[in-house]
Amino acid sequence: MPLSSLETLQQVFGYEAFRGEQQAIIDHVVDGGDALVLMPTGGGKSLCYQIPALVRPGTGIVISPLIALMQDQVDALTELGVRAAYLNSSQDWREAREVERAFVAGELDLLYVAPERLLTDRCMDMLSQGRIALFAIDEAHCVSQWGHDFRPEYLGLSVLHEKWPGIPRLALTATATSATRSEIAERLDLNGAPHFVASFDRPNIRYRIIEKNEVRRQLLAFIQAEHEGDCGIVYCLSRARVEETANYLCEHGIPALPYHAGLSQAVRADNQSRFLREEGRVMVATIAFGMGVNKPDVRFVAHIDLPKSVEGYYQETGRAGRDSLPATAWLAYGLQDVVQQRRMISESAGDESFKRRLGAQLDAMLGLCETVSCRRQRLLAYFDQAIQPCGNCDTCLEPPEAWDGTVAAQKILSAVYRLWRERGQRFGAGHLIDILRGKPTDRIKEYGHDTLSVFGVGADLSENAWRGVLRQLLANSFLAVDHEGYGTLTLTESSRAVLKGEHTLMLRRESEKKSRSSRSTGGRSKESAVLLPPEAQQRFELLRTWRAEVARNHGVPAYVIFHDATLREVALESPQTLDDLDGITGIGVRKREAYGEELLRCVAGLPVL
């Protein structure tokens, strides 16, 4: 007799109870229903299709966009005793043919397939010869052309409903606004399916956004002070920035690896494998890296360039702390980021509707950066979720000062106005600040700008303070970037009300000290983690050493054997018998049989045979 959903959860995966809406989703799919599932990274999305695939007759077909994710998932499932395989371009024809044979023969519980592979005639013919339990479309936001990671091959997945109308389908993602959800449902023909929307909150992640000032030095100080020896991801906007930052970190003792689309497939694959399998590696990458990365012990995600949207930012920061232990989302953001992003939108090839959509996404991201209220509140409000102030972001822990910046704004806007009105000229941020601070540079003298009435009227504010004012004026569209003038600044419709004194501007002020430091919230994330008693800590280290050796022998990442959270619990409980392992999270029947005796010997301090 097949196991029930709960028995499968407990005996195969080693968890005592379902979380949130997992059981409702699983029961619905087991009964043959379609579903659209939104659940944050680390919230247990995979179980929502893995368990129904094991309970229902046939093979669960999982459409996944990343080869690395497929291999990780299959390795982890194989360790649990689940019959899992994948089909993708990394296999030769003999390996692929054997997987196809196993599927047709009914020897697989789960089969992972890339979307472009799925849509081939060969794959479609193969699927028609076997028994299918369900279709799971992972990273379903890729089907949305307005989403942050559109992939055109996802548009063809509506064929699944046409060819197999009686097979349940799940679309799953960690990131989607209500508009993106509607587009997913429309494009995948899931309009009649219920939407299961879990909380987007990741309370273990501490959000921090600082003012950019020598960003590589700030990044290094952040890692050294709070995450030395930890695994992390650093996101950069360009390939060159990735290479420069990875080299800089390596030169200062941080084991960093680069990842971007300009590297060869072999180098990317090797770097990703090292990141997944080695302790304490830092991956410096463009957004080409990360979707579906299943590494649970990423302790920080850092951005040294401004993300283009809140959805992208949430998706990327969600790769930290999948094990529910404390983690940090750190972002350095400055004036040039705003100028660059505005210019990129203006120069994009899309129509005006497309540019307005990009502009709205950027405005939401800028609003998150400039808020003086709880960052988590602002972040979750983007996904239509309301919470109380979190107490675990920089604005909660050290509330920023708000100040009346109306006069300062009028001075900047007046300078822009006079340059254009009197002389037909436009200039960038640095030159405007020099004029306001009365700095007699050669360029200012050359253009005669030291004779302007606004020359020197802003000497009371530092250069850094003026950059903050300019940044916020750009963020709130009181100034605009003139892309035809190579990034020069121009007034907007909203400027008039400020110049006339009809609009009061309350601005965010960062202290000079804080803008130069990464430690704006104080305290190391490691100190906020659950500390183990000394004896348990010693057992934990022995268990980690044992796990690393087992993982090397099996050729899989360490977390595929056991997560840190499981080893912590074993170290704390100090089990003496195999029965004592029952109920420890992450130890199911298969893992107890495979590793139980070795765990007990580690706990007892005995050599593992």
Image (cartoon, rainbow, N blue to C red):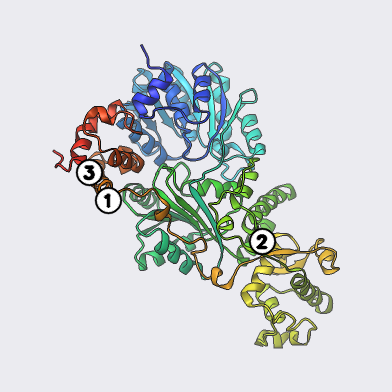
Label 2 crowd bin: few (<14), some (14–19), many (20+), radius 10 Å: some
Quadrant where the N terminus is found in the figure: top left
The picture places residue 251, in percent across and down from the top left corner, at 36, 68
Q: CA distance from mark 3 to mark 1?
A: 19 Å
Q: Residue at x 55, y 57 (%)?
A: 397
Q: CA distance from mark 2 to mark 3?
A: 52 Å
Tag 3: amino acid? Trp
Select label 2 or label 1 by which is in front. Answer: 1
The picture places residue 565, in percent across and down from the top left corner, at 36, 41
The answer to whether 218 is drawn above or below residue 344 in the figure is: below
According to the picture, the residue beneath numbered tag 3 turns out to be 546
Residue 581 appears in the picture as rendered: yes
Residue 557 appears in the picture as rendered: no
Q: Residue at x 46, y 64 (%)?
A: 219
Quick one: SS at disc 1? helix
Tag 2: amino acid? Arg
Which of the labelled discs sits on residue 534, or is there none?
Answer: 1
Tag 1: amino acid? Pro
Left/right of residue 595 with respect to residue 560 in the rendered view? left
